[in-house]
Image: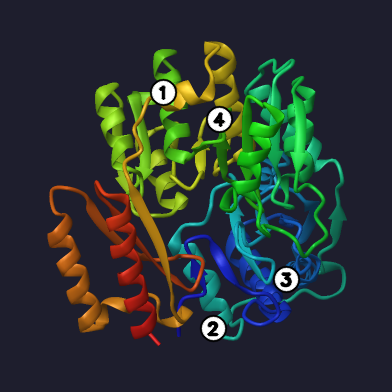
């Protein structure tokens, strides 16, 4: 049986793969594993994004938490990084986010944080999973006065906003900013934070109805934001995803500024101010080759990890780095939060614009983005890790590696959160690499049935 936990918690189609029963079991097993050494009655914070299935799964999860004698604090719709921060701020024992991030509405997920706001290590996730697979053997269920209670807090999102604007106290008076909230968890926090700092905010896709999260909007669908920035003559556009742990930007000309470029801009600024610890940035193997060249030219040391912001974070903690992230826009400012934080990323980027007085198009020219093609191959979820078992796929990848040796690279990997195998090729000719990536993706889709 496949592992329940992927690179970002437990994910699946709500009510089909991620059922209320599984949510309740995760609440029971998670509360047990995370708090078994504690002498006091433990408390776990729970938040969610705007998906219609969030209430259903949150209530099932909290029922599980209470059934094993732990208390729950429900903070409602807030960004994932807000739960990470508030778990530490309120000194609760653990936190849980119910979200499927950038995925469509039918998906949802359950992700745990420990009491310090960090995602769980693999061994602790394995322990939670073992309880579920062993029919809750070893889990103690409470009765009578031992049953847990649920407390509801409506002020939590204000605490998170206050934290962000105190961390990056900039003045945005008169700056026109278009914000795409992806009909997700940032629909309030990002808009209010920017307004409090004095910005002229034009918000789009900030009317979530439970079914429209990430629907042709947000950081995965930026065409409307690009056009709106140009139409409004705005200085910048900001695009969040459904749970607001990632950020991509748009410059004043309507061009996308991705996570690599944002880290290049902010990382160089931090280095100049002596704030970039060890002059080092941690990224994944998906980062553009242009980012690595930029770092070499500017005296910044780069370390690469496998894909997943959790692996970036692990390495950051190991070597005491304070900036790291992914091309997709998960950017971690470890001095201020313990996970990717779209709002903090936005404020740091705006800080550079304000302090330097430079347009975003000028700032982003610090690195040349080399041609890159990323094509997703749709495969059954339980087979996405087995694509190399097929000789025709392995042979095709070997041929591509030889073709691009010295002039680019080929990176194939299963998605940690979706039923996909991602095919990424970098090279000199955009049309050629797109054609090669598409052919390989089609081969994988047609072969892995």
Please tell me whether mark 2 or mark 1 is closer to you in this view: 1
Residue placed under numbered mark 2 in the picture? 133
For the residue carrying disc 1, how many other residues have a C-alpha within 10 Å: few (<14), some (14-19), or many (20+)? Answer: some
Q: Is residue 3 above or below residue 294?
A: below
Which residue bears the numbered disc 3? 68
Asked whether, in this view, residue 3 is left or right of residue 281, the answer is right
x, y (%) of residue 389? 26, 82
Separation (CA) of disc 2 from disc 3: 17 Å
Q: Nearer the viewer, residue 330 or 358?
A: 358
Identify the residue under disc 1.
276
Does label 3 or label 1 sit earlier along the sequence?
Answer: 3
Q: Position of residue 359 (x, y in %)?
A: 54, 19
Disc on res. 357? none
Q: Nearer the viewer, mark 2 or mark 3?
A: 2
Mark 3 neighbour density, 10 Å: few (under 14) some (14–19) many (20 or more): many
Q: Nearer the viewer, mark 1 or mark 4?
A: 4
* Horizontal and vertical percent position of residue 121: 46, 57
Residue 430 percent across, percent down from the top left: 32, 50
Which residue: 39% across, 55% down? 307
Query: Marks 2 and 1, how far apart in space?
Result: 44 Å
């Amino acid at each position: 049986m496949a592992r329940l936990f992927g690179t970002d918690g437990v994910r699946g189609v709500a009510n089909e793969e991620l059922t209320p029963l599984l949510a309740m079991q995760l609440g029971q097993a998670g509360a047990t594993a995370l708090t078994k050494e504690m002498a006091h009655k433990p408390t776990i914070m729970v938040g969610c994004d705007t998906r219609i299935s969030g209430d259903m799964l949150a209530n099932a999860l909290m029922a599980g938490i209470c059934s094993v004698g732990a208390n729950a604090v429900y903070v409602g719709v807030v960004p994932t990084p807000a739960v990470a921060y508030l778990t530490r701020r309120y000194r609760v024992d653990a936190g849980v986010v119910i979200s499927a991030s950038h995925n469509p509405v039918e998906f949802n997920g359950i992700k745990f944080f420990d009491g310090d706001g960090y995602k769980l290590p693999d061994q602790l996730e394995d322990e939670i999973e073992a309880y579920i697979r062993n029919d809750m053997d070893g889990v103690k269920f409470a009765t009578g006065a031992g049953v847990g209670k649920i407390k509801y807090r409506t002020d939590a999102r204000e605490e998170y906003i206050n934290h962000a604007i105190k961390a990056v106290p900039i003045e945005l008076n008169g700056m026109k900013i278009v914000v795409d909230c992806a009909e997700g968890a940032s629909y309030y926090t990002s808009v209010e934070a920017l307004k409090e700092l004095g910005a002229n905010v034009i918000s789009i896709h900030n009317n979530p109805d439970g079914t429209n999260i990430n629907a042709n909007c947000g950081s995965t669908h930026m065409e409307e934001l690009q056009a709106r920035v140009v139409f409004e003559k705005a200085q910048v556009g900001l695009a969040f995803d459904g749970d607001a742990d990632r950020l991509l930007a748009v410059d004043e000309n309507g061009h996308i500024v991705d996570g690599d470029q944002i880290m290049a801009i902010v990382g160089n600024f931090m280095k100049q101010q002596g704030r970039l610890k060890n002059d080092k940035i941690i990224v994944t193997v998906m980062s553009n080759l242009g980012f690595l060249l930029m770092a070499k030219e500017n005296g910044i040391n780069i370390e690469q990890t496998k894909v997943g912001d959790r692996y970036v974070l692990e390495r950051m903690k190991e070597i005491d780095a304070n900036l790291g992230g992914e091309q997709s826009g998960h950017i971690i400012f470890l001095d201020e939060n313990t996970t990717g934080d779209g709002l903090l990323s936005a404020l740091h980027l705006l800080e550079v614009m304000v302090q330097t007085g430079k347009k975003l198009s000028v700032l982003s020219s610090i690195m040349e983005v080399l041609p890159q093609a990323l094509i997703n191959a749709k495969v059954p979820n339980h087979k996405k890790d087995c694509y190399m078992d097929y000789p025709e796929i392995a042979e095709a990848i070997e041929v591509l590696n030889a073709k691009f040796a010295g002039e680019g690279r080929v990176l194939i990997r299963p998605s940690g959160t979706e039923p996909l195998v991602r095919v990424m090729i970098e090279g000199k000719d955009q049309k050629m690499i797109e054609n090669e990536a598409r052919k390989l993706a089609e081969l994988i889709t047609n072969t892995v049935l």
